[in-house]
Structure formats: C-alpha cells, structure tokens
Amino acid sequence: MLSSVLDPQIVAQAEALLRQTQKPVIFTHIAPDGDAMGSSLAMYHWLCKGEWRMANSESSKSVTVVVPNAYPDFLAWMPGAESIVVFEGNEEQASRIIAEADLHICLDFNDPKRIGPVGEKLLLNPCPKILVDHHLNPVSFATVAISHPEASSTCELVYRLMADIQKSQTDELCLTNAIATCLYTGLMTDTGNFSYNSNNPDLYEMIAGLLRAGVNKDEIYNAVFNQWSPDRLRLTGYCLYRKMRLFPEHHLAVIALSHAELKEFHFKSGDTEGIVNLPLQIRDVYYSILLREEPAKPGTTHPRIKFSFRSQGDRPVNVYASEVFRGGGHMNASGGELYGSLQSAMNRLLATYPKYLKKE
C-alpha cells in the first residue's frame, strides 16, 4: 500500500476543481521529456476518456494538452500524442484554447517562465490553476499547488493524486492501459530507467499497479531507448570522442555542443537525451554536465544555452543548477539555462563548479 504523501486538504481542493471543469487545458514545459509527456497524457486520458470514475464526472469534458514546442520523435508513439496542440507554429489556435479554458493544469514545471510564450497566455486567463510538480522553489501562481521535490517524477505525483481522489470512491485505483502506459513512461525516463531517485519502495508499488493495468514495460523501454536515428548515434560518438573534457580533481566530465555542431548531425528534439549520463560510466567520474547551444530566436539577441546536470550518490547538482543556472530538478538530475554565447556559458561553469562539486 502506498504511503500517504499528499496533503488531504490540497487533494480535496484539486478534486473540487477537477470535478467542476468542462474545458481544462493541460500544460507542460519547453522541450517535453518523458515525464512531461507522460504526466500530461495520463491526465488527459483520465479526464476526457471516461476513466475518471467519480460522481458528477459523467458529462464529457473537452480536454486539450498544449506543449510549447515539438516533442521528441521517440515519444510520438505515446497514447494520445496525436491530439497534442504544439504552440510553436499554431499560436492562434493554441491561444484561443488557453483563453477559453475554465481550468489550467500545470504539470512538471514550477514557473510560467519555464513554458516560454505559453506562460504569458496562461497568466492572462484568470481561471483556477492546479500545479503538480517535483522541482525546487516553485513560483506562487497556482490556485492549488502539489509540489514535492523529493518525488521521483511528476508522474509519481499524478499517480498519487489519482489514487487519493479515487480512494473516496473505491479502494482500488482504476487505470486503463493508456493511463498506465503514460505514467510508466514518465517514471522510467525521469529515473534513468530506475537508476537514480528511485529508492522509495512506493515507486515499485506503483509499478506493480501499472503492470496489473496491462503495461508492457519491455515495449515501452524499446520504444523510448531503442529507436535512434543514425545521426543521433553518430552525434553521441562525436560527443564522447571529440567533445568530452575531464576535470579529475572534481570527478567531472563536461560536453559542450554548439548549434553549428548540432546542425552537422541534423539535430532534432531529443537527440541529446541520455548523452549526459554516459560519462558517469567512467571510473571516478561522479558528475557530468552537458551544454547545448540553441540559436537566438527572432527578436532576441543572444542564443540560449541549455544545461543538463547528472551526478551519482549523495552529490547534489540541483542546488548548483538553481543558484547559478536558473534551473533545478532532482538531487542527481537537473537542468538549467543561460542566455549568451556558448563560450561565456562555459566560462561561467568553469568559474563556479569548484564551489558546488565535491572534490573527494
């Protein structure tokens, strides 16, 4: 049985909003990953497909998932992905949907700035907002906030919310295969296939429940991790052979990729996923950082540098990501960003990492 984590009062407030809504919109962050997609699509299926078996929920809901930009190809197979509205390139349609919503459900981000221009549209609509997230230091913008940085993933928190709400109706959590598949994808990807942030026994209680709902975990693993393009594999080899720098005193590996280098390998969203984990396979490397340059957008001057941080054991990277790179995340897996040149971002990293990364 799952331990009680969510505040019953907050669950009741979220439940009331979810009962009443007829036109909810679900949001997640820029460059959606497995947890973002999994939590959003699980919530989508739970609300609009009749699987949310509660009194007063029989009437159909018009539910939409809006993501700021394209999601990776290796997540396009997920149930319901074809119904997602991508804001970038569909601004007029997405803006109308956001403005007409009677509830905003914000998943896997802690600040409207994390969803780019979508965040501005979200704040223009005064409708109630539910936040479900596991990142540090959430900004106060939601009517109801379920924020637990100790959780493995947002999918874990969505699972708990569903379970706590349905508990008032039945002792058993009713999950369809579609919901369970989406939740498992998020749990799997945000823990590196259960290699970090995954020591809580509750996590495996959840997995057992998802398997009972018909999840094929081997197929999901194959769909996410074994569908690479030749260019993605070549890019990975290039990163390890040409771009990886080691800083032995702090057990650190750093890989920095310019936009020109990414273009050479026909980069698509998601192609650098997992590369940051690979240097941790080196003996005595406990920290790994990947920098990736994105070109300046129209109307802006500087490119954006995206950071991915990984670590092993009791060596946190989320504080470093939060305090220096405007980001955050898990203790062992975090992200951040800076605006400016790739070299200036690298200089910032080289000037600050000795303060935050352990030497032993």
Image (cartoon, rainbow, N blue to C red):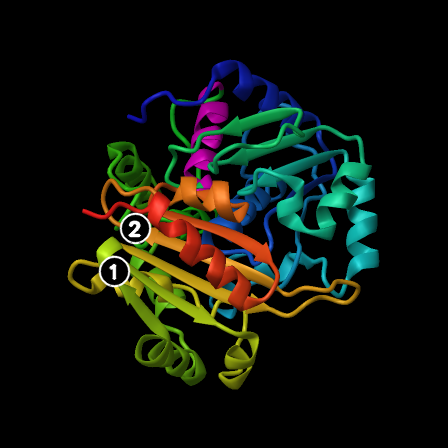
Q: Nearer the viewer, residue 189 or 17?
A: 189
Question: Can residue 312 be seen by looking at this rendering?
Answer: yes
Dominant secondary structure of the magenta stretch?
A: helix
Earlier-in-chain disc, 2 versus 1? 1
Name the residue rendered at 83%, 49% in the picture: 96
Whether the residues at callouts 2 and 1 have beta carbons within 8 Å, the answer is yes
Q: Quadrant of residue 109?
A: top right
Depicted 242 relative to depicted 272: above or below: below
Q: Which residue is mark 2?
A: 311
Quadrant where the N terminus is found in the figure: top left
Question: Which region is colored magenta?
Answer: 154-168
Name the residue rendered at 46%, 63% in the picture: 291
> Which numbered circle lies on residue 52?
none
User: Given the image, on which type of amino acid does mark 2 rest?
Assistant: Ser
Q: Which residue is mark 1?
A: 280
**Image mark count:** 2
Spatial separation of the CA atoms under disc 2 and disc 1: 8 Å
User: Given the image, on which type of amino acid does mark 1 rest?
Assistant: Leu
Q: Residues within 10 Å of mark 1 (few under 14, many from 20)?
A: some
Q: Residues within 10 Å of mark 2 (few under 14, many from 20)?
A: many
Q: Position of residue 354 (x, y in %)?
A: 34, 49
Question: Can residue 77 be seen by looking at this rendering?
Answer: no
Q: Nearer the viewer, residue 32 or 215?
A: 32
